[in-house]
Image (cartoon, helix red, strand yellow):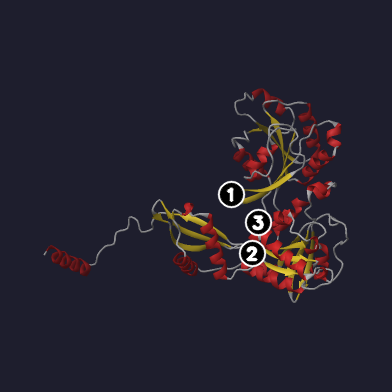
Amino acid sequence: MLPVIALIGRPNVGKSTLFNRLTRSRDALVADFPGLTRDRQYGTGKLGERPYLVVDTGGLVGDEQGLEGLMAQQVWRAVEEADAVLLLLDARDGVNLSDEQIAERLRRSGKRVRLVLNKVDGQDVDAVLADAFALGLGEPVAIAAAQGRGVRALIDRVLAELPPEQEAPEAGEDLEQGIRIAVVGRPNVGKSTLINRMLGEERVLAYDQPGTTRDSIHVPLERDGRHYTLIDTAGVRRRARVSETIEKFSVIKTLQAINEAQVSILVLDAHSGEVAEQDATLAGHIVESGTALVVAVNKWDGLDDEQRQWFREQLDRRLPFLEFAERHFISALHGSGVGHLFDAVEAAARAARTRVPTAELTRLLERAVHEHQPPLVRGRRIKLRYAHQGGQNPPVIVIHGNQTSRLPASYRRYLNNFFRRELKLVGTPIRLEFRTGENPYQGRRNRLTPRQQRQRKRMLRHVKK
């Protein structure tokens, strides 16, 4: 499970700015007035090789009305879900009554809480530090989130206090233990019905009401002598249509399930007639995680030919970055097409574990460059020398050369598609890493043999004549 870090505090203390720093994104809206974040934002970050989830919450006032309001309920639900909580204070305003009330409740929660004193740039923070110590939550960490000062040290300290993640099993262990499959999608697209059909029994609550699955459910399954674990998650819902706090934060469990799984089945609702924004967002999270993927378009049996063609066009238009994934058009309710999902899952899992020798990858790189050369940069051709595999799940191909940082995105996409096509990788994303290094032969002298030296002398005499 990825560790979850919740950011809480009064309005306008810089939670969204810190969120953007920790996730290296601009997902959270930032402006210098209170209450801009009405709902929580979530995102993933990475420190070295350790990933984490960050939740940005709305501002708390600290009085009874604020704590009992719907937005306050969301905030405290985030605290319950979190492994660590960062309470942000504003160094310019100092500690006030709202901060004290929030700190008091956090002390009672039993959670790991770290005080963060933000906006310290240009401020004399000694007096504020003394007041912050009085909150009884330990030593504050001073940062300037807008400029990025102190943010790396903060997340270093927070992650160091959390228990280490369990190491992922090796590829051989994966084969023995079976494949972990996350079944994900918006609410009411038929995830639980699909799992029930795959299991052949009513093991997961399925009801025609969005959000009836309240938590991630792990269901073991054996089929044709192979073992699987199906992970059913609460659906990702459009925020404007959500009223219950439990559903608000189900997206955390969805992202955790994706990162825990080896293969994700993304379930889409053909009956809705569109690929929704939430579908595309969830698909983006799956690709970013590197998990292998199978797309299951559910409720296909209720569409006529024209509607089916329209939905296929929607898939191509809205999800072009999923061209590597197999698509299966199914009816979870009636079982049509469901059996083929297991074959697709097996193929995707095998592709994600692919190992390719360095010699073969280098030959493929030479072919790709021969068919379509890299562009010129300031009159010099970018040279790609050799490639080797840097990892699995997903496959990582490391390409060495010169000026690789100047390769345009279009050429990187060309290489990605070329390797995928030639290696016949279906169902898994691949990652390309580019490294620029010095010439490995630089500084090495080619010493001539005595015979070569005599030949060289004869050639020089001939030239002099």
Sequence-first disc among 3 and 2 = 3
Tell me the CA gap for discs 3 and 2: 16 Å
Q: Is residue 167 something that shows in the picture?
A: no
| Numbered disc total | 3
Q: Are marks 1 and 3 in contact (CB under 8 Å)?
A: no
Q: Which residue is mark 1?
A: 48
**What's the amino acid at mark 1?**
Gly
In-image side of 341 versus 245 (left or right): left
The disc placed on residue 269 is none
Q: Is residue 30 above or below residue 168?
A: above
Tell me the CA gap for discs 2 and 1: 30 Å
Q: Are marks 2 and 1 in contact (CB under 8 Å)?
A: no
- Tell me what residue is drawn at x 76 percent, y 62 percent: 268
> Tag 1, which secondary structure?
loop
Sequence-first disc among 2 and 1 = 1
Q: Which residue is mark 2?
A: 323
Q: Which residue is mark 3?
A: 289
Q: Nearer the viewer, mark 3 or mark 2?
A: 2
- Tell me what residue is drawn at x 66 percent, y 68 percent: 348
Tell me the CA gap for discs 1 and 3: 15 Å
Task: Check disc 3: other Cα within 10 Å, few if <14, some if 14-19, many if 20+.
Answer: some
